[in-house]
Amino acid sequence: MTATVVLDIGKTNVKLALIDADGRQLAERRRANAVLRDGPYPHHDTEGIWHWMLDGLGEFATMAAIDAIVPVTHGATAALVDDDGLTLPIPDYEHEPAVPLAQYLAVRPAYADTRSPRLPAGLNLGRQLAWLATAYPIEFARTRHILMYPQYWAWRLCGVAAGEVTSLGCHTDLWDPARQQYSGLVDKMGWQDLLPPLRRAWDTLGTILPALAAQTGLPAGCRVVCGIHDSNASLLRHLGGSDGPAVLSTGTWVIAAAPGKPLDGLREEADMLANTSASGHAVPSMRFMGGREFAELAGANPVSCDAAALQRMIDGGTYALPGFAGAGGPFAGRAGSVAGPAPVNDKERCALATLYCVLMSDYCLSALGADGAIVVEGSFTNNPHFAPLLAALRPGQSVAVTDDASGTTCGGWMLAHWGSVPRARSAIAAPLRLDRWVAYRDAWLHRLN
């Protein structure tokens, strides 16, 4: 039996998945995505992930003949490498770069050119790179390649350096989505020669290095695929035509994508952006850190809520008002608060977190002008009330829930089998019509002003 391995690095967790030729998951391994603080700045535990991954590949090699490995990762992250490896640790994008913001703003392209909103900390990758070039000039001068995070893992596996548009086009300030070319920042900073040739996300870059094949037991001909930004992986299954659905990709970040909608409705102050799809098209998008905000509201002992707890929050006039993550989103800079009677138990805390995430998702979809079908994929598909509550707020639009709680893994598999789409099973959510739910949404919106 042949199979594909997807390395799926999210901001919170790392997953290694073994998927057969029909798109069915055979096995998976998970670990936390830790941020290390033992270096010059908070950085990703790349060596920890690397050795954990190799162990997993060795385990999977006893279960199937692995014919391809596909890296899928979160955005706003890049690696500086020379021929021997990293020249600097890979920064955590939640770390505030130690370079005056005004200095970066002087070279940063206009929003109209990049559709990349100004974001806090290192969420604009260009700011991270400008800081590293200034603060660590010796190490930066040694750098041979700037690799986006998926392509860093592909490079370690096969030794071929590549660039790819989905990570470059993810609020980096490095990419012009309308023209599908590098932005003026790359020229200003002199980074052209450090950015390797662009390849398509589904391209095979090479085969696994012989030493790694020997170490893990993988076939010598195992392909290493270029890889993709995670929310764009989630979008792949739904990009069949011009009238494709809006997609809510849910996880640490909840990202609403509205393929086919115009870019001129995007607003920088609302953290609206144009991502770039794997096929090289600008995709109007909006997001908030929903998974983390849910965890903040649900508390240390999250439990499932029920319709009765949801109704109590609505009847009591308890509102969660953004934001609770401090990392971008349409209400960046606001301190989150709870108005009205506080939840009294874990069920009510979960109910409030659910209501909040539904309202924020509805807000983003409306801001993007998403007026057709909606598909929910990712971790929120495990919440039985999320899609039904959203459907009740959007009459006339179908809200479907995919069968796969990790659309990123599905998208990764698709890259290794380009032209094939695994059988998509989705269910239309029946609206959950709680009393005064629409009025509650309207009152929540009024409180935002």
Image (cartoon, rainbow, N blue to C red):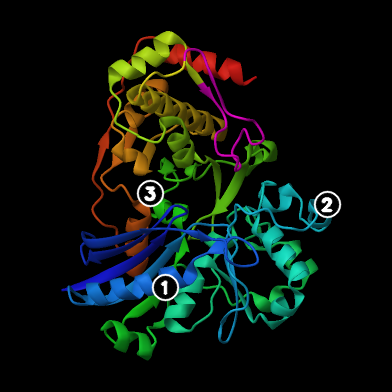
Residue 242, visible in the rendered structure:
yes
Residue 418, visible in the rendered structure:
no
Label 3, residues with CA under 10 Å away: few <14, some 14-19, many ≥20: some
48 to the left or right of 191: left
Residue 46 vs residue 263, the one in the foreground: 46
Q: Which residue is mark 2?
A: 102
| Residue at position x 73%, y 67% in the image | 186
| Residue at position x 47%, y 41% in the image | 292
SS label for mark 3: helix
| Residue at position x 81%, y 58% in the image | 107
Quarter in which the N terminus is drawn: bottom left
* Amino acid marked by disc 2: Ala
Q: Quadrant of residue 409?
A: bottom left
x and y percentages locating residue 187 in the rendered image: 77, 69
Instruction: Check if residue 15 falls in the magenta segment.
Output: no
> What is the magenta segment's predominant secondary structure?
loop
Label 2, residues with CA under 10 Å away: few <14, some 14-19, many ≥20: few
Q: Is residue 391 above or below residue 214?
A: above
Quarter in which the C terminus is drawn: top right
Q: Which residue is mark 3?
A: 238
Q: Which mark is residue 50?
A: 1
Q: Earlier in the sequence, mark 2 or mark 1?
A: 1
x and y percentages locating residue 10 in the rendered image: 44, 55
Q: CA distance from mark 3 to mark 1?
A: 31 Å
SS label for mark 1: helix
SS label for mark 2: helix
